[in-house]
Image (cartoon, rainbow, N blue to C red):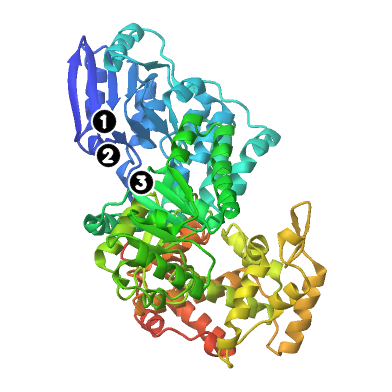
Amino acid sequence: MSLFAHSLQDSVALIAIGDLGEALAAGLAARIAHDQADPAVLGIVIAFSGVCGAADDAAQGSRFKELPDLLQQIEAGRKPVITVWQGVARDEVCEFGLACHARIMTGDARIGLTYVKRGLVPGAGGTQRLPRLSGLHAAFDLLLSGRIIEADEALRCGLVDFVSEKDALAEAIALVRRLSGTALRRTGLLSMPACQAVDIEHVTAPFLRRLRGQDAPQEIVRLVCLASTHDYALALAEEYATATNIAQGSQAAAFRHVAWAERDLARRVKEESKSARAIQSVGIVGAGTMGTGIAVAFLDVGYDVTLIEADDAALARGVQRIEAIYDRLVVGGRMPDAVRRERLERLLPHTELTALRSADLVLEAIFEDMNAKSALLAKLDAITKPSCVLATNTSYLNIDHMADGLADPSRLVGMHFFSPAHIMKMLEVVKATHTASDVVATALAVGRRLGKIAVVAGVCDGFIGNRIFSKYRALCEFMLEEGALPFEIDDALETYGFAMGPFAASDLAGLDISWARRKSLALTRHPDERYVPIADQICEMGRFGQKTGSGWYRYDKGKRLRDPEIDALVRAHAAKAGYPQKAWTADEIVARILAVMANEGLQILDDGIAAQASDIDLVLLNGYGFPAYRGGPMFAADQMGWERVVQLMESIASLSGPSFTVTPRIRALAADHSRIHAAV
């Protein structure tokens, strides 16, 4: 539905709206004012249908600038105005209904205020009217989570007067006739619960911890509390001013960039997926943590999965892992037991590769060893049908080398899942030199069905994400030799928005894993490459992270604690290394890390490993915990300015030898003040 439709039924004006922004532009306010003044009209029913709301964030301050005034006029009007929510009513459409004198939902409708998910705050009364209807606890929950709720929950919260299971419009018209001439329930006149500091802190603390560093959640809390201490009209004006200011800020811009990047990628994936092969039967070789997580991801969306392990004991452990994942969902009330049973019925455990003869897609998820993976893929090449797509879940290894041993290298593709594979949204689809275009399309289509953000990458050490991560991690270790301590680097990045800094994350993963990889690469390491042995020394001390109670930190009942022994170890090594020492600020640490990420990202673009800069941002956002409200490393570098990136990289390169070089394109970007994101 475009614009809005107007009719008169039983002396009640019925206005049907599909798009609120278009309706406002087409004169909705004038239409409502006319109906309010028409003596033949008893009241107004405004019906929203489809998916309404969540307007273009960039235009939030202008496209809906007349909405707050319109809603105050509706709220204060002498005739009843009833909202009917059908479909999904978000944000401005939800705020519209909160200002009306009654609200009706259809049983299948959903509503919510999702602003916080986009770095925004409500601007049309959401923080002022919602708590008056729902109470503080429910209001903070809905505003800070950005949840879309079902009709029954909305009824319990007091957001709707009743849920219609029959003819919502007829019921709304009847309600208008009953309310006509009576004292109307005006949301703004309802009593507002007092915001007690202790209670508010208790309710909001879990959300603010999760959303730390973001401006919008803090402002939402402030505005809701303002509702209990300020004049209603003044509080509404402050909300609108705050919403406009936040919408023009850097965090909202980062969220807009991420939304644009996701839409653009989805469009490209959808187009490329048109040539995909049909996939239903999937084989997964390797029933470890990664393999079973991948199996769950496939089972969850309807694939038939054959899970292969070398022996019965390992296979049984893998099946138990899968069952445990589903058992937790059932016990937690997030999955009916019937769904669990149906998914497990599509799981076929087996110890023989010959069980994969008829599979449409076979993915190997064994340990990260080139010889082992290559040998397995050669066996699969001989066993599977010619149309079967072969995929490897390698994180770093050269897929071209794996393809060398195949009779048909065109059917091998990389599908790099991130752990836990059934939860993490990122999927790198790695196109090797000989990978057929329809095989890449198939991997993308599978990723799309799995609900993953699937980005195509070329072949190199670490592809997109791990290639950047390895540079970022190396720089963090270099800074240890230049005066920084592990906790300082972690604190700086966590304050910036990362869930964990690199040293805390290493402790969580287990230091022995990366130690084994470093030892395997030692023989091929360039003799002039700068190498920091501190992590090796920590492993030699038997400190492998959280699982041993100590690593970069020590752990007391799971709590991470700074360890003076590690500080002393780092200081002693730094003194011997001979690099200039300095006291690092958090901003300096973050700026250097962003510069290195962006520098490597540009080199990845120049090498043809990634298609565009926004793809790099999506990989780091969804696979490595880069904070969404910062937009990704390439967007952040745009914001920081490439001149600053050049300065930082020159400083880093002067001490780092061949480990870091300044990507030529950075100098070009700095010279003409360019940006690499068309959407910025």
Q: Which badge, 2 or 1, is on the more N-terminal residue? A: 2
Instruction: Report if the CB atoms under discs 3 and 2 are less than 8 Å apart.
Output: no
Residue at position x 26%, y 54% in the image: 270
Residue 359 spot, x, y in % from top left: 35, 54
Give the secondary structure at mark 3: helix
Q: Amino acid at mark 2?
A: Gly
Residue at position x 42%, y 48% in the image: 305
Vertically, is 655 above or below 62? below
Which tag is nearer the camera, tag 1 or tag 3? 3
Q: Which badge, 3 or 2, is on the more N-terminal residue? A: 2
What's the distance in space between the residues labelled 3 and 2, CA to CA? 10 Å
Residue count near mark 3 (Cα–Cα under 10 Å), binned few <14, some 14–19, many ≥20: many
- The residue labelled by disc 3 is 60
Residue 579 spot, x, y in % from top left: 68, 88
- The residue labelled by disc 2 is 21
What's the distance in space between the residues labelled 2 and 1, CA to CA? 11 Å
Residue 398 spot, x, y in % from top left: 43, 76
Q: Is residue 263 left or right of residue 348?
A: left
Name the foreground residue: 125 vs 106. 106
Instruction: Report if the CB atoms under discs 2 and 1 are less than 8 Å apart.
Output: no
Residue 572 spot, x, y in % from top left: 79, 82
Q: Amino acid at mark 3?
A: Gln
Q: Quarter of the image for the C terminus: give it.
A: bottom left
